[in-house]
């Protein structure tokens, strides 16, 4: 029976110690939340994350200058192609459907012959 009472006292002391720890943690959280709101904490964390991301991007760009430059050039070319897409499409169409020099010459010769016939008549 004495062992049971001793175990009960030990368990009670452990429970009280755990309760004191929980109360201390709650008091710390309450005091910490009173100093800064949740929105302020989120904003600070987002600002720190953005600063870290910007620093990592700057480090990457510094060590990989050629790749970053190529990416920027490709992006600018893609934007220019998008802006002038109609003109480019017309130019490609004209290039693909352009008549050969021989066909152009034959058409021109027929036109000159027709003009000459109309002058004679």
Image (tube, helix red, strand yellow):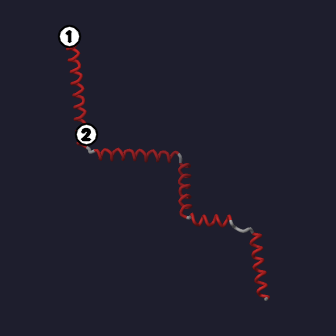
Residue 84 lies left or right of residue 58; in this view the side is right
Please, is residue 89 above or below residue 59 in the view?
below
The residue lying toward the viewer, choosing from 43 and 1, is 1
**Residue at 24% across / 30% down in the picture?**
22
Q: Quadrant of the C terminus?
A: bottom right
Q: Position of residue 99 (x, y in %)?
A: 72, 68
Q: Secondary structure at mark 1?
A: loop
Q: Secondary structure at mark 2?
A: helix
Please count the marks in the image: 2
Quadrant of res 4: top left
Disc 2 crowd, CA 10 A, few/some/many (<14, 14-19, 20+): few
Q: Position of residue 27 (x, y in %)?
A: 22, 35
Question: Given the current orientation, which residue lies at the most extreme bottom position?
Answer: 121
**Residue at 53% across / 63% down in the picture?**
83
Q: Are marks 2 and 1 in contact (CB under 8 Å)?
A: no
Q: Which residue is mark 2?
A: 32
Q: Quadrant of the N terminus?
A: top left
Q: Which residue is mark 1?
A: 1
Q: Position of residue 19 (x, y in %)?
A: 22, 28
Q: Closer to the observer: label 2 or label 1?
A: 1
Q: Reading the chain from its start, which is encountered first: label 2 or label 1?
A: 1
Residue 105 lies left or right of residue 16; in this view the side is right
**Residue at 29% across / 46% down in the picture?**
40
The residue lying toward the viewer, choosing from 35 and 104, is 104
**Residue at 60% across / 64% down in the picture?**
89
Please, is residue 79 above or below residue 118 in the view?
above
The residue lying toward the viewer, choosing from 90 and 84, is 90
């Amino acid at each position: 029976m004495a062992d049971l009472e001793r175990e009960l006292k030990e368990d009670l002391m452990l429970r009280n110690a755990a309760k004191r720890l929980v109360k201390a943690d709650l008091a710390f959280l309450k005091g910490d939340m009173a100093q800064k709101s949740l929105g302020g904490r989120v904003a600070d964390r987002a600002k720190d994350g953005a600063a870290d991301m910007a620093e990592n991007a700057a480090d990457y760009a510094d060590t990989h200058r050629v790749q970053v430059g190529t990416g920027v050039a490709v992006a600018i070319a893609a934007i220019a192609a998008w802006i002038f897409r109609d003109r480019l499409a017309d130019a490609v169409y004209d290039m693909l459907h352009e008549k050969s020099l021989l066909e152009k010459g034959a058409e021109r010769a027929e036109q000159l012959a027709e003009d000459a016939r109309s002058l004679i008549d």
